[in-house]
Image: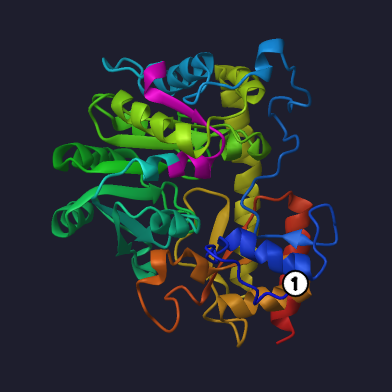
């Protein structure tokens, strides 16, 4: 069937960055099981055993009542376990504690974000550039709110202070702000006192923060004596009043992306609203997988998994940065978190100094990357410009196992040095 065929009533829905590059690789023979390919575009971490990590789950028991639908907000027992985890990690000794009524379970991160987006009213919602590619269609498909872009500058290391934030909220009349923290793709992390000031600003200016914390256990600037995890939940004053909405799940921080078990942590009133949206959007997540998730939230499991991630992925991070820098591919800032390097290709010869050109050339070496222009979140393509401001960037993932990363970097070295 020709690509030009159109079907009445259906629009062309763009693919997110990872889906696009994977689809293009498929045209050249890529399959996820084909070990001759190196995927530096993947948005998932390696899912196998890591030194010091708890044993991986290989089987899940399905009880008789697990054949039924789960409640749209999720199993009460899992909601209790998530709330207890946040209280143990971030709210010890604080008078305001999360309860199960502050948690909603969903079948995947995008589904959780979609529930929240569908629940927003006629407001101005701020979002940063660059940020997660899937936000673009999410911010376009719901017409109730207006998406307002906020540009972060690589020359400043993507810094954005609480004072900057205050000016943007007041100057642009923002009632909500969507962001990933740590940021996908730059790895910039808002943490400590600065994150505390952000939460305080949300409270004082009555601006709801929708914070994607799916990489919050991939933190490379942790403080001594603390698990290398950061969350805005640490700085919330009143869990039912502060307008802070947090998204996380097993996808990255427990390395179970295929389970599609995620959660939203927020004031109880927000949870009621997103659950109502879920009743018509997705109907709720998998009951057996939600039940199987509960033991994974135990203290010792979280501690061991987080420390194992930190050791293994920090080493991969450092090795990738060093090899990229030797080729003249530099990051505006070394990533504070995530498992990505946001590489600036401007110092390379054409066509490798362009993210799409680099992507096409790397495909010939069976290496997949994600061009930077996909992170120039532009809902509805309302901003008109000839080329993306992130055209000279590429996102390199170090989510894969080290042998695959080593082979990928060797092929990229061959590609660059041959020019």
User: Residue 372: horizontal and vertical position, in percent?
Assistant: 52, 69
Residue at 39%, 36% (x, y): give it. 246
Is the residue marked by circle 1 packed among few (<14), some (14-19), or many (20+) residues within 10 Å? Answer: few
For label 1, the residue is 1
Residue 120 in which image quadrant: top left
Q: Which residues are magenta?
A: 100-114
Q: Is residue 36 left or right of residue 358?
A: right
Could one spot residue 93 in this view of the protein?
A: yes
Could one spot residue 230 in this view of the protein?
A: no
Residue at 30%, 42% (x, y): give it. 209
Number of numbered discs on residues: 1
**Badge 1 element:** loop
User: Residue 243: horizontal and vertical position, in percent?
Assistant: 26, 35
Q: Is residue 113 magenta?
A: yes
Nearer to me, 226 or 303: 303
Q: Is residue 2 magenta?
A: no
User: Residue 230: horizontal and vertical position, in percent?
Assistant: 42, 36
Indicate the colouring scheme.
rainbow
């Amino acid at each position: 069937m020709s690509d030009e065929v159109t079907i009445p009533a259906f629009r062309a829905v763009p693919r997110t960055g990872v889906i696009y590059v994977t689809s293009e690789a498929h045209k050249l023979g890529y399959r996820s099981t084909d070990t001759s390919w190196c995927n530096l575009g993947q948005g998932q971490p390696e899912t196998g055993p890591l030194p010091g990590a708890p044993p991986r789950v290989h089987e899940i028991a399905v009880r008789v009542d697990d054949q039924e639908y789960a409640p749209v907000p999720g199993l009460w027992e899992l909601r209790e376990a998530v709330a207890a985890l946040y209280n143990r990690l971030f709210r010890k000794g604080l008078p305001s504690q999360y309860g199960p009524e502050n948690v909603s379970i969903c079948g995947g991160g995008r589904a959780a974000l979609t529930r929240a987006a569908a629940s927003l009213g006629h407001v101005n919602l701020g979002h940063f550039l660059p940020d997660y590619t899937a936000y673009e269609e999410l911010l376009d498909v719901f017409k109730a709110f207006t998406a307002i872009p906020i540009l972060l500058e690589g020359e400043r290391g993507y810094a954005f202070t609480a004072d900057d934030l205050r000016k943007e909220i007041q100057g642009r009349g923002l009632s909500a702000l969507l962001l990933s923290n740590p940021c996908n793709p730059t790895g910039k992390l808002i943490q400590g006192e600065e994150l505390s000031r952000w939460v305080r600003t949300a409270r004082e200016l009555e601006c709801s923060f929708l914070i994607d914390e799916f990489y919050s256990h991939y933190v490379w600037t942790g403080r001594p004596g603390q698990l290398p995890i950061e969350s805005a939940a640490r700085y919330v004053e009143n869990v039912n009043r502060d307008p802070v909405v947090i998204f996380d799940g097993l996808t990255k921080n427990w390395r179970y992306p295929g389970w599609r078990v995620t959660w939203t942590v927020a004031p109880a009133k927000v949870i009621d609203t997103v659950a109502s949206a879920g009743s018509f959007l997705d109907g709720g997540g998998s009951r057996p997988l939600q039940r199987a998730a509960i033991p994974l939230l135990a203290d010792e499991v979280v501690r061991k998994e987080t420390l194992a991630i930190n050791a293994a992925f920090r080493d991969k991070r450092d090795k990738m940065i060093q090899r990229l820098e030797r080729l003249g591919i530099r990051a505006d800032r070394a990533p504070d978190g995530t498992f990505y390097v946001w590489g600036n290709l401007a110092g390379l010869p054409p066509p490798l100094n362009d993210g799409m050109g680099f992507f096409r050339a790397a495909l010939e070496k069976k290496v997949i990357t994600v061009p930077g222009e996909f992170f120039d979140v532009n809902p509805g393509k309302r901003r008109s410009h000839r080329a993306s401001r992130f055209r000279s960037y590429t996102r390199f993932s170090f989510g894969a196992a080290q042998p695959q990363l080593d082979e990928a970097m060797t092929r990229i070295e061959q590609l660059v040095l041959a020019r």
